[in-house]
């Protein structure tokens, strides 16, 4: 997979997780560089679920000290990119 | 085999904790002594009718897409869709005192208009109270200290009657202290009842329970019914051994962590040798608040608009363990059919809850058993008859010559004259069914707000964690599981 394709893949994986956690949110026009909490009704319990689903679906562990890196969609992609299989 | 998590009790909070634990990929077992889930909030069938126990109303009502309500958070965390619950908002409810009545619904303007008309000098203060409650910092899981709402309230609301009328329904819906409530609980319940509002799932409490049970199965949690945990033994700090009674047999269950929704004192009693916390210095923390509840199932629903009536016969509210079997000064009347549009409900039940004295009911039950007498049964009948009289009284005191109450006194008589069946719960029945010390439905007087006990792998959720009501209980189970099971599962 090319790097560009992988970025798209990782981004979609995160969007899919958010869609599972918050089925009532409109994720169509989500902005990558704006904090997820400012665009969606997500609180700390929902971020815990993002971490939980990353573990369940993709076997990726996110230690609590790294949670702030998941604040925006682009932050998520940047942080998770090396953790996803190539 | 060792489970990652064993949950004691399939009450609302235990169910939520088990679902969250299983969602995070843990191996979870949920042990429930009865053959039906729900604990304090359950249901039974009688003559083709489903009767709810516990739940009168769900607090924290919200419209789809309004997402500040704790109920919204609960449903999202448990992945339950809002539509599945089929929530019916109450048409209106009332706090009824001799000198004044406050009618409220889920339209906040209605309560504001009531306050403006009936307590004109207090409307600005009431607005301040709303802002105060919205901004109150919540300390769930941080272990805040108990503060008195009764002592605090005069700093915002000056009128004594209004103070009482606000405290009264909130105490009735969740205080384990006499004549007062913890300030944080007051802030939470004030928002939950008056600002967000009351509703009820169409189909009652069993709808919630069916959905929760379905979620348990979907997440792969093992639900073991008819299993009573009788003892918990520490196995070298590695895991806990739960001895479980199944009929005449005993089972052993090993778990690394345990969450109990059985109550603090009740859980403590399961440790036969080492106590979770020193009991001797805490003998006085048992909750004193318990209730009787009369349930009448009628041929039809009375022509009456309110869903819940919080009535007090005195302008000074009364909320404590009464000196007699029951207290007839105040109570809570619920018409489950008055949620949703007219004629939408079909339960045809009327329920009346009164404060009651556990010790007296307990003594009666014991002496009836030992001397083979009917004292306990007779007392139940007498108190049920007193409940009927109170209900009639309440309606007769209304101004029946005018407005929506017109003709109601006849209505209630003819409705109660056609009762299909009646039931009457006492604090002793509550104790026998739930195991609660003193039949204390709101738990003990001390709360364990971080969910921790002195045992490193044992946690509490539910009433003694300090979150009340069905929504509070579910939130409690979620929060405790998140903190100690889900968040730590990476380690």
Image (cartoon, coloured by chain):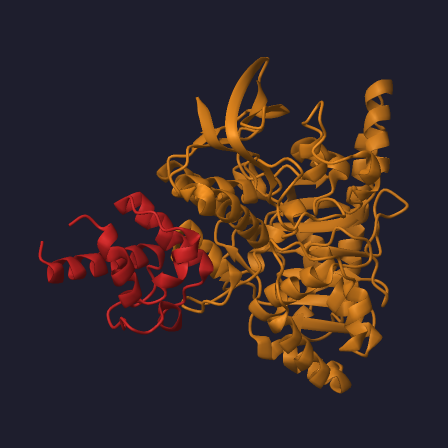
Q: Which chain is orange?
A: B
**What is the quadrant of the C terminus of chain B in the image?**
top left
| Quadrant of residue B8 within the rendered picture | top right
Q: Which chain is red?
A: A
Q: Residue at x 70, y 44 (%)?
A: B441
Left/right placement of residue A4 relative to residue B143 reads: left
Q: Give the mark count.
A: 0
Name the residue furthest top. B248
Nearer to me, A6 or B92: A6
Image position, residue A64 (x, y; %): 43, 53
Name the residue furthest right. B323
Nearer to me, B54 or B480: B480
Nearer to me, B116 or A1: A1
Left/right placement of residue B235 relative to residue B271 reads: left
| Quadrant of residue A41 within the rendered picture | bottom left
Q: Residue at x 70, y 85 (%)?
A: B124
Left/right placement of residue B256 relative to residue B329 reads: left
Q: Residue at x 71, y 51 (%)?
A: B352
Report whether residue B418 is seen. no
Image position, residue B254 (x, y; %): 51, 24
Image position, residue B427 (x, y; %): 76, 39
**What is the quadrant of the N terminus of chain B in the image?**
top left
Nearer to me, A43 or A51: A51
Image position, residue B240 (x, y; %): 56, 26
Q: Residue at x 72, y 67 (%)?
A: B95
Name the residue furthest left. A2
Report whether residue B326 is seen. yes
| Quadrant of residue B325 within the rendered picture | top right
């Amino acid at each position: 997979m090319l790097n560009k394709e992988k970025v798209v893949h990782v981004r979609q994986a995160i969007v899919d997780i958010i869609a599972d956690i918050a089925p009532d949110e409109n994720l169509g026009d989500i902005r990558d560089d704006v904090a997820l909490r400012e665009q969606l009704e997500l609180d700390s319990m929902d971020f815990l679920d993002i971490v939980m689903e990353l573990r369940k679906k993709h076997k990726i562990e996110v230690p609590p000290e790294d949670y702030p890196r998941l604040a925006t969609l682009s932050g998520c992609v940047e942080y998770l990119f090396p953790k996803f299989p190539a | 085999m060792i489970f990652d998590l064993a949950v004691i009790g399939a009450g609302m909070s235990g169910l939520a904790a088990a679902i969250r634990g299983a969602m995070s990929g843990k191996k979870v077992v949920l042990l429930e002594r009865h053959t039906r889930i729900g604990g304090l909030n359950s249901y039974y069938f009688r003559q083709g009718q489903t009767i709810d126990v516990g739940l009168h109303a769900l607090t924290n009502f919200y419209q789809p897409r309004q997402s500040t309500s704790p109920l919204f958070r609960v449903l999202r965390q448990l992945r339950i869709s809002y539509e599945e619950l089929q929530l019916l908002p109450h048409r209106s409810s009332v706090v009824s005192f001799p000198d004044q009545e406050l009618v409220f619904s889920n339209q906040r303007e209605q309560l504001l208009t009531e306050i403006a008309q009936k307590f004109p000098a207090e409307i600005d203060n009431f607005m301040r109270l709303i802002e105060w409650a919205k901004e109150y910092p919540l300390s769930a899981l941080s272990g805040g200290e108990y503060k008195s709402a009764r002592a605090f309230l005069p700093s915002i609301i000056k009128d004594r009657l209004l103070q009482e009328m606000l405290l009264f329904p909130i105490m009735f819906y969740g205080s384990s202290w006499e004549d007062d409530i913890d300030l944080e609980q007051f802030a939470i319940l004030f928002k939950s009842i008056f600002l967000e509002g009351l509703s009820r799932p169409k189909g009652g409490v069993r709808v919630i329970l069916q959905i929760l049970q379905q979620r348990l199965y979907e997440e792969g949690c093992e639900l073991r019914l008819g299993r009573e945990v009788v003892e918990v033994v520490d196995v070298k700090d590695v895991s806990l051994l739960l001895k479980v009674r199944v009929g005449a047999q005993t089972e052993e269950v090993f778990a690394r962590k345990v969450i109990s929704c059985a109550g603090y004192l009740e859980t403590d009693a399961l440790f036969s040798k080492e106590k979770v916390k020193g009991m001797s210095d805490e003998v006085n923390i048992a909750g004193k608040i318990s209730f009787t509840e009369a349930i009448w199932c009628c041929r039809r629903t009375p022509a009456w608009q309110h869903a819940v009536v919080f009535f007090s016969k005195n302008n000074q509210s009364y909320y404590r363990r009464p000196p007699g079997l029951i207290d007839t000064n105040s109570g809570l009347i619920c018409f489950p059919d008055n949620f949703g549009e007219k004629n939408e409900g079909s339960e045809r039940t009327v329920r009346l809850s009164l404060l009651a004295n556990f010790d007296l009911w307990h003594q009666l039950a014991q002496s009836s058993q030992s001397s083979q007498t009917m004292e306990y049964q007779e007392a139940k009948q007498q108190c049920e008859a007193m409940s009927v009289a109170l209900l009639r009284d309440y309606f007769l005191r209304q101004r029946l010559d005018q407005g929506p109450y017109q003709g109601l006194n006849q209505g209630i008589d003819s409705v109660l004259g056609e009762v299909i069946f009646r039931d009457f719960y006492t604090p002793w029945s509550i104790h026998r069914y739930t195991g609660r010390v003193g039949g204390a439905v709101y738990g003990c007087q001390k709360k364990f707000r971080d969910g921790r006990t002195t045992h490193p792998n044992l946690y509490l959720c539910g009433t003694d964690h300090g979150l009340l009501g069905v929504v509070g209980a579910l939130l409690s189970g979620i929060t405790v599981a998140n903190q100690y099971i889900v968040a730590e599962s990476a380690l």
